[in-house]
Amino acid sequence: MLTVGLTGGIATGKSVVANILQDKGCYVENADLLAQILMLPGGEAYLAVINHFGQQILSDDGSIDRQKLARIIFMEPEERDVLNSLTHPLILRKVGQKVASLEKSGDYEIYVTEAALILEAGYQVFYDRVVLTFCKPETQVERLIQRDGLSPEEAWLKIKSQWPLEKKIPLADYLIDTSGQLTETVEQTEELYLRLYHDSQLKKMGKLIREVD
């Protein structure tokens, strides 16, 4: 089975591409959702996160308030690194377990992890292929304003807190430009699926070579 990391900056259309790939028959997991599950009361990361960030991040019911936590890690990048160090290894373990289970079942040809920080964390080495979504920064700002109700200034701050596109492109195998109409994104993703399926068949034959320009 081919393993694929689907990544990209905030509001660049990762979820749209993920949904299309899922409709085409890929098994898709969302790393943010995995992290949320790990931080639920009783989850593998719950106590470690509270021990570091303190009771201030808790809701009245004892669960971790993701908005409170998000404000901390956005204002203090070093704290974001700590959170990632507490959750990323656990997420990778879950990914490995899921891939092993799916390969045993033989039900899927392609496994996809949708995650924002694959390249920043250096985790591209865990995947056979990396797909990068991107769009014009102005489009990102518009989407963040509409989706999250941010001011233009807040939107730009979020975008600038992430790696610039020129740093990500050399690390990706395939690119999806989501700047245009949805139909254009769908067309690119359908073409991407055909390429990934081809790669999955090469992997079956033991001929897959990871080429990154």
Image (tube, rainbow, N blue to C red):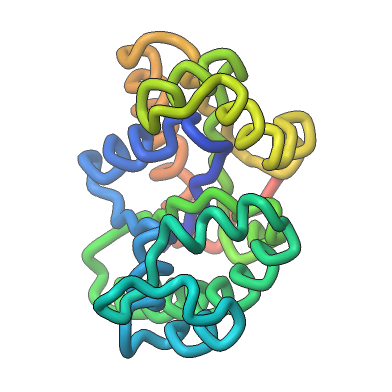
Whether residue 41 is visible to the viewer of this picture, yes or no, is yes
| Residue positioned 54% across, 45% down in the render | 7
Q: How many marks?
A: 0
Quarter occupied by the N terminus: bottom left
- Could you say which quadrant of the image residue 149 lies in? top left
Residue positioned 40% across, 81% down in the render: 97
Q: Kindly tell me whether residue 213 is visible in this rendering.
A: no
In this rendering, would 136 be left or right of 39?
right
Near-viewer residue (66 or 128):
66
- Describe residue 165's horizontal placement relative to residue 8 as left or right: right
Left or right, 171 with respect to 13, comes to: right
Q: Nearer the viewer, residue 167 or 96?
A: 167
Q: Residue 195's x, y, as percent?
A: 46, 36
Residue sitting at x 41%, y 61%? 66
49 up-or-down from 12: above or below:
below
Left or right: 43 in relation to 19? right
Q: Residue extending furthest top?
A: 181
x then y, percent, for residue 31: 43, 60
Question: Which residue lies at the image location 25% right of the left edge and 78% below the top edge?
Answer: 61
